[in-house]
Amino acid sequence: MRDIEERGLAVYARGSKVKGTTTGGGHVCPIESCGEWCIGVRWPDGELTYPCTGGMVMRSDGARQIA
């Protein structure tokens, strides 16, 4: 999921239809055994979070979903 660092990609919240967009920023996940990336996601309410790509799945429409 390296391309997730691109800006403007869709990310859906866990168990909902709320869609955020990637900011283009991120960092390596701080969990030692993970090795994935935490990417910046801006949500419709303005909140900025950094979910780990290790906890995301690819949807059939090409967007990511937090699992």
Image (cartoon, grey):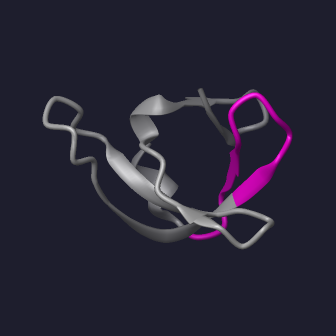
Place of residue 52 in the rendered image (x, y in percent of width and height, measured from the top left): 42, 43
Q: Residue 44 sits in which quadrant? A: bottom right
Rendered view: 25 above or below 27: below
Rendered view: 40 above or below 60: below
Quadrant in the picture for the N terminus: top left
Place of residue 26 in the rendered image (x, y in percent of width and height, measured from the top left): 38, 64
Q: What residue is shown at x 72% (from left), y 73% (from top)?
A: 46
Q: What residue is shown at x 58% (from left), y 70% (from top)?
A: 7
In this rendering, would 61 be left or right of 35? right
Q: Residue furthest right?
A: 17
Rendered view: 30 above or below 59: below
Whether residue 5 is in magenta: the answer is no
Residues in magenta? 7-20
Place of residue 45 in the rendered image (x, y in percent of width and height, measured from the top left): 78, 67
In this rendering, would 33 be left or right of 49? left
Rendered view: 8 above or below 1: below
Whether residue 12 is in magenta: the answer is yes
Place of residue 13 in the rendered image (x, y in percent of width and height, measured from the top left): 70, 41
Quadrant in the picture for the C terminus: top right
Q: Residue 12 sits in which quadrant? A: top right
Q: What residue is shown at x 34% (from left), y 49% (from top)?
A: 37
Q: Residue 9 sits in which quadrant? A: bottom right
In this rendering, would 10 be left or right of 16? left
Instruction: Work out whether residue 16 or residue 22 is closer to the camera in this orientation and state it.
Output: 16
How many dots with numbers? 0
Q: Main secondary structure of the magenta part?
A: loop
